[in-house]
């Protein structure tokens, strides 16, 4: 999904954005043009990826790093989580081949996304980010939350209880609006530097991959990088 008003992001603006990315050493791949040759990926500076290790999976020394910029109210993000991510975990993350990093990129068109991101980050403080991550996406698909209001807050407190988090700690964190905003905006600012314009968007060893693609597409992309690295 595109940040802001999709109708305003015309082809000229998109090409200009891609040109900026390439000039910065971060080439952009449009996967609908998968037959096009790909330049060598620029390595990601691991020190600049995240300051929240509980929002990551796998070995930080893995040969391939995938950074996801996502929105808990984005249906395409939910599709990736449901249809593709479990296979990536089994084949690449748990086997030490991929280091996976989640970063927040809540879109203004989704009123509940920012509060959901706060709930996930508060769960992360208790080492519960990934169970909350999955619960939030499932809940969004089922229509259990959406408005970013007090009703959503109650739903997220219920999720925390389901996951057996410390409720006093979680509630205090969820209500710390300023601290939550700072964490989320840190990710958003990084996304803007990486030329993120919608969700889900991924950095694959420094290259931008836009959209929720199938496992077969990801398998091809990751295996290609592993082969080039001799892994």
Image: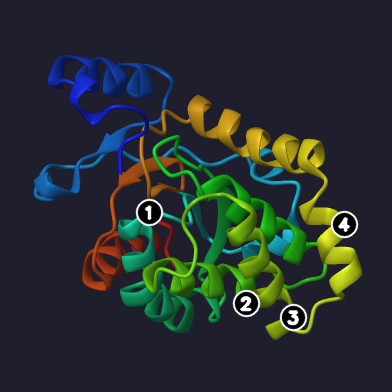
Nearest to N terminus: mark 2 or mark 4? 2
Distance between mark 1 and mark 3 Cα atoms: 24 Å
Taking the spot 59% from the left edge, 56% from the top edge, the residue there is: 116
Residue bearing mark 4:
172
Q: Is residue 46 visible?
A: yes
| Image quadrant assignment for residue 23 | top left
Q: Residue at x 42, y 28 (%)?
A: 195
Are there few (<14), some (14-19), or many (20+) residues within 10 Å of tag 4?
few
Residue at image x 16%, y 20%? 10
Q: Earlier in the sequence, mark 3 or mark 4?
A: 3
Q: Which residue is mark 2?
A: 131
Give the vertical position of 194 relative to 14 (above or below).
below
Q: Are marks 3 and 2 in contact (CB under 8 Å)?
A: no
Q: To which residue does mark 1 refer?
A: 74
Q: Position of residue 226 (x, y in %)?
A: 40, 63
Q: CA distance from mark 2 to mark 4?
A: 19 Å
Residue 225 on image: x %, y %: 36, 57
Residue 200 numbered tag: none
| Figure colour scheme | rainbow
Q: Is residue 59 visible?
A: no
Query: Does residue 45 appear to the left or right of 109 in the view shown?
Result: right
| C-alpha separation, residue under disc 1 versus residue under disc 4 | 26 Å
**Front position among marks 1 and 3:** 3
Mark 1 vs 3, N-terminal side: 1
Q: Position of residue 217 (x, y in %)?
A: 23, 64
Q: Which residue is mark 3?
A: 161
Residue at 23% across, 42% down: 38
Secondary element type, mark 1: loop
Which of 196/218 is in front?
Answer: 196
Q: Which type of secondary structure does the marked residue at label 2 adopt? A: helix
């Amino acid at each position: 999904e595109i940040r802001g008003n999709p109708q305003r992001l015309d082809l000229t603006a998109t090409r200009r954005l891609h040109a900026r990315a390439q000039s910065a050493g971060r080439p952009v791949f449009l996967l609908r043009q998968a037959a096009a040759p790909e330049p060598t990926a620029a390595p990601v500076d691991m020190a600049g990826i995240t300051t929240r290790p509980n929002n990551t999976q796998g070995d930080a020394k893995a040969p391939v790093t995938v950074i996801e910029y996502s929105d808990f109210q984005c249906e395409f993000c939910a599709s990736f989580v449901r249809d593709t991510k479990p296979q990536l975990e089994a084949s690449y993350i748990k086997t030490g081949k991929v280091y996976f990093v989640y970063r927040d990129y809540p879109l203004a068109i989704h009123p509940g996304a920012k509060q959901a991101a706060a709930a996930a980050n508060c769960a992360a403080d208790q080492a519960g980010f990934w169970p909350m991550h999955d619960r939030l996406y499932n809940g969004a698909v089922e229509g259990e939350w959406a408005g970013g209001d007090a009703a959503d807050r109650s739903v997220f407190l219920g999720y925390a209880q389901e996951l057996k988090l410390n409720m006093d700690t979680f509630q205090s964190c969820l209500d710390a609006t300023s601290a939550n905003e700072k964490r989320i905006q840190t990710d958003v600012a990084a996304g803007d530097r990486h030329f993120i314009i919608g969700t889900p968007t991924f950095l694959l060893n420094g290259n931008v991959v836009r959209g929720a693609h199938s496992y077969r597409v990801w398998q091809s992309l990751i295996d290609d990088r592993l082969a080039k690295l001799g892994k």
